[in-house]
Image: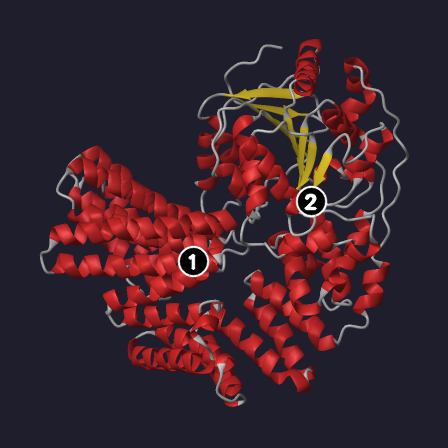
Amino acid sequence: MTLSGGYTKEAKMTTEAYTYLKEKIAEALQNNYVFFVGAGISIPSGLPDFQSVSEKLIITVSQGEVGADDASFLSKNLRPEVVYQIGIDELGLGVLLSMEVLEGGEPNAYHFLLAEVLRRGGFVFTTNVDGLIEKACRQIGLCPGQDFNICFGQSGDEDFKDYVTCIETGERLKPCIFKLHGSIDVGDPRRKYESIQFALRQVGKGLFEPRRKILEYFHQNFVFWFLGYSCRDDFSVFPAFITSRSEKSTYWCEYDTGPLAVSLLESGRPRWELEQEENKSLEQERNIGLININHLLSVRGKSYKFKVDLGKLLETRLYADIGIKFELSSCKISPDMLSLNEWAREVPEWERYLFVSRLFEEALRWDKAIEFCEKATRLASAEQFTVRRRLADIYYKEATPEASEAAIKLYQQCVDSLDAGRARASLKTSIANVLRRRGGKWLDKALEKAAEAIKEFESSTTELERETDLEYARCLNVYGLSLYSKGQYAEARRYFESSIRIKSRLGDVDGVAESENAFSMALTQEGRSLLATGRKDQAEAKFLEAIEHARSAVEARRYIGNRRGYAMNCRNLAWPYSELVKMSDKEKDRREYFIKARDGYRAGISAWMRITPPPPTEVITFTNILVALYNDFCRLIDAQEEKEKWALEGLQAYRRVLEDPKLQDTAQSETRSPTAQQNLHQMQELFLEIGLSDEAKEAGEILKQFKKSS
């Protein structure tokens, strides 16, 4: 089969196609290529994928309080690692008993291929915690520790640290299985899930540094094969790939039971496909796995895709043809969650409700989160402080006017139940932030409450304690935001800097991003104030500095997979670019800033749309800001063709809104400027100005629809 430079060349399994695949597998074995494998390789052994385990965990722990539909929703919208982290936080290590279902099974053809990779001196990375690769190795006569290493996080990651040392000193690298999310330790029952628990602590913060260094080193220096990997782990592995570029080739196996298909992706194709997926209309579902895969392929050299049931092909033909001998055992059915069920029956009912509430809260389903938290409130008579604060946190995140009022009331009840101290200070911080977000007449009260919180922190803790206290760092950030809301930008930045210092020292990546984002907002507003008084050069410097802080926040949120934070930070990265568009005298610079502002707002919309269900208020807010940018840019340029292009882009954005009833309702009721109505009115004038009367008429018709129920 001849491979062209096109995207996909479908083919029946001709002699040429099969020969090509066989040669590439043999080449990988001969040249110590790296194999990166996910849960898909263990499914043929009878093991469930991690999402299925997560769903069973939710149903079992809730003892039937969460139905199948809701459990399916949660397992699809929350990473399994997040579900487990919340479970451990709320209920303890008993939730790890569910891992029993991953202790069964026998190695399949994939595992024996990986064993052969290790036997010949190669390397394997896996996100799986089962022991089937190691079992396959033992069955072909390989001895762990002697013939190959296993790094899975022993003794506080000492095994990964030792391997980093080997890389840095230039020692010969021993074949190794790198188990990035830990491993079930079958050797010591007392420590069976210890490394998994260790890895779960890092959820949302990226990989531990030694693991990240090893993955980045191999990613940059080796050819990679990917098998059974979904590329949906935004929270850990995926960020390490996209932040380390490589010119090495990539072979991606996509499971498919149809005829073998091979494709060579031409230069730029992954980036094009990525943009096509991200730029789908708002009502279309985006394939997150496909987006991430193309992100990954776009930072590497040549990329090859195979659509094939590789496991079956290995078993029936490939192994014999490349000279590998092995014996497959019949698959052992994994045990059920009997131990977990027995443990869960002993968990107090109110604690189970809090666990479920936290899951829905994380999935942004405020109604369900509140429902289960209120159930916990009614049952936990001795734990009223805990459940009230949790319910207040949910209302705080929901952020509607009604929810904000409820949050303040509950936080105040918690404050009144405590004597002076750190816990009271933390609660006052939350009250201050709710008041700040309400704006207007509440801003003075927010600043006052944040100042009270700082004073109470300082009177109840030592300076050394505060330097290692993330709650105090949050308090500093909220006080800075309160100052920012009152227009005291320079003073606000001092508190943001102090907050960043503490969070950085403690490794709080998400917290640092939060403060960097706030820092950027303050700089942007300073720039706007300077520009309003004619100090153009100083304003430009502030905008450019704001961009650097916002970019740090965006990259950090992308790195750890915080999509909500990433979306908000994309907007605040685009904001100073939008200001530069309006103030720039040079046409070339203006166009460059415009594209960067547009990309930021569009990236934010895309991130919101990747949340299920997408939050309509945020989608509309970002859409309105984006269309306002198009309108402003059209007023600043002379080229007729460009005016048409960007005006039509804005019109298309509102066409998409009309296709979704929730988005349309939100666009009709949203009063924050710029509104959809304001944008459409300007758009009408713009279309008439450039001679597009039909489009002007359409913009007017959409405007009428938005006014009907507003």
Question: In screen coordinates, is 241 left or right of 651?
Answer: right
Give the residue drawn at x 63%, y 69%. Answer: 357
**Mark 1: amino acid:** Val
Q: Position of residue 142 (x, y in %)?
A: 81, 29
Secondary structure under the numbered disc 2 in the rendered image: loop
User: Is the residue 413 above or below the residue 236 in the image?
Assistant: below
Residue 255: image location, x then y, percent:
69, 31
Tell me which corner region of the image, top left, top right, bottom left or bottom right, holds residue 127. top right
Image height check: is 642 above or below 708? above
Q: Residue 526 or 50: which is nearer the viewer?
A: 526
Q: Tag on residue 27?
A: none
For image coordinates 27% across by 54% down, the residue present is 679
User: Measured from the top left, where is residue 351 in percent x and y?
Assistant: 70, 74
Q: Amino acid at mark 2?
A: Phe
Mark 1 or mark 2, which is nearer the start of the sequence? 2
Q: Indicate left or right for 290 with 99 as reference.
A: left
Quadrant of image for the C terminus: bottom left
Q: Which residue is mark 1?
A: 512
Q: Which residue is mark 2?
A: 152
Residue in the image at 51% along x and 19% along y:
6
